[in-house]
Amino acid sequence: MEIKKPTTFIYGILIGLIGIVLFSSKAVMVKLAYQYDVDAISILFLRMLFSFPFYLAVVFWNRKKTADAVLKTKDYYWLIFFGVVGYYLSSYFDFVGLQYIKASLERIILFLYPTIIIILNRVFLKKTITSKQLLAIGITYVGVVITFWGEVVVSGSNVYLGGFLILLCAITYAAYLVGSGWLIPKFGVVKFTSYAMIVSCVCVFLHYLIMNETSIFSFTWEVYLLGLLIAIFATVIPSFLVSISIKMIDSSNFAIVAGAGPVSTIILAGIFLGEQLTWLQLFGALVVIFGILLVSLKKVKI
């Protein structure tokens, strides 16, 4: 069993918590931006546009540092693939889905990704799913159904589309985490995160130029400010914090830390958006969190 120093483990948890809370603020700020009549790809474009210089600067600053392992051409191909899947497709599904559902419900559905990781490991890596994991997965999805059904009753059938898009976001993000756990030791935390985000930024830029007809100069100042805040505080900073945390405490322990995500989003959405979940939805959220913890606690390494 891997032994980690107590101080390293505690710092890793704190860093992960900060990263998760900052990531959770993204959904709230995107919903705020939608109040100014901006579409999903435009606010995503602003997010990546403001993020791009930071990642370029990090790459330039670390250009002379050698990789932690001998890199092969296929490693770069995989990095490009996970950059496209993990931060371009995942972000796009997320931003579009947020047009149809609450920020708090979005985070609850996204929180399924640890169970999706288990399923992906079973399908692609032939890892066995234990009976306890199956129970936890069942509990988690029951919680999502409870929460989701409660929202359909309140908000109508558009929630189905939004929920499906957020589920796609969770699946692609889970695929990214599986890949990042394998590639981060080869590239190093900083290089891998920067390269993956640059790939994602380029994809978003191309998407915007090809598909969007809205001028980037046509928005109100509030939209640009929110785009900047999303870029710095909900993208750049947490992307590095999460990668560092995963390296310090491993991805299994990080899944437990991520339990703060739905809770922090529910609180932030209540403060800034006035969103309120029913008691049934809150119960469903607690069931989801319990199911994820049941999955994660089995694999804790200290």
Image (cartoon, rainbow, N blue to C red):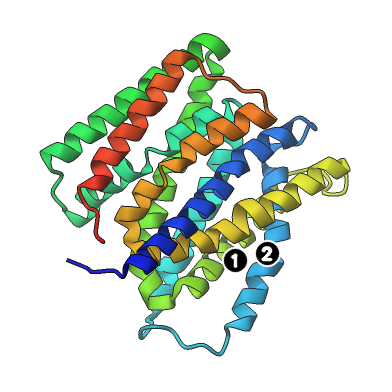
Q: Would you name the residue on which mark 1 appears? A: 198
Residue 43 is situated, as x and y percent measured from the top left of the image, at 71, 44
Residue 52 badge:
2
What is the CA distance from the residue labelled 2 to the residue labelled 1?
A: 7 Å
What residue is shown at x 19% (from left), y 40% (from top)? 133
Q: Residue at x 66, y 23 (%)?
A: 274
* 160 w.r.t. 12: above or below: above
Measured from the top left, where is residue 212 in percent x and y? 73, 44
Give left or right: position of 38 versus 256.
Answer: right
Which image quarter: residue 1? bottom left
* Kind of residue sitting beneath label 1: Ile
Q: Residue furthest front?
A: 7
Identify the image quadrant of residue 54.
Answer: bottom right
Please identify the quarter of the rendering in which residue 96 is found.
top right
Q: Residues within 10 Å of mark 2 (few under 14, many from 20)?
A: many
Residue extending furthest top? 153
Q: Position of residue 180 (x, y in %)?
A: 39, 63
Image point (51%, 88%), residue name: 65
Of helix, strand and loop, which one carries label 1?
helix
Left or right: residue 123 compared with residue 54: left
Residue 75 coordinates in the image, percent (x, y): 39, 74
Residue 263 shows up from this direction: yes
Q: Is residue 130 left or right of residue 5?
A: left
Q: Is residue 180 visible?
A: no
Q: Which mark is residue 291?
A: none
Q: For the residues labelled 2 and 1, say whether their Cβ atoms are less than 8 Å apart.
A: yes
**Is the residue marked by circle 1 packed among few (<14), some (14-19), or many (20+) residues within 10 Å?**
many
- Looking at numbered disc 2 in the image, what kind of residue is underneath it? Phe
Name the N-terminal-most of marks 2 and 1. 2
Which residue appears at 72% of the width and 58% of the height? 49
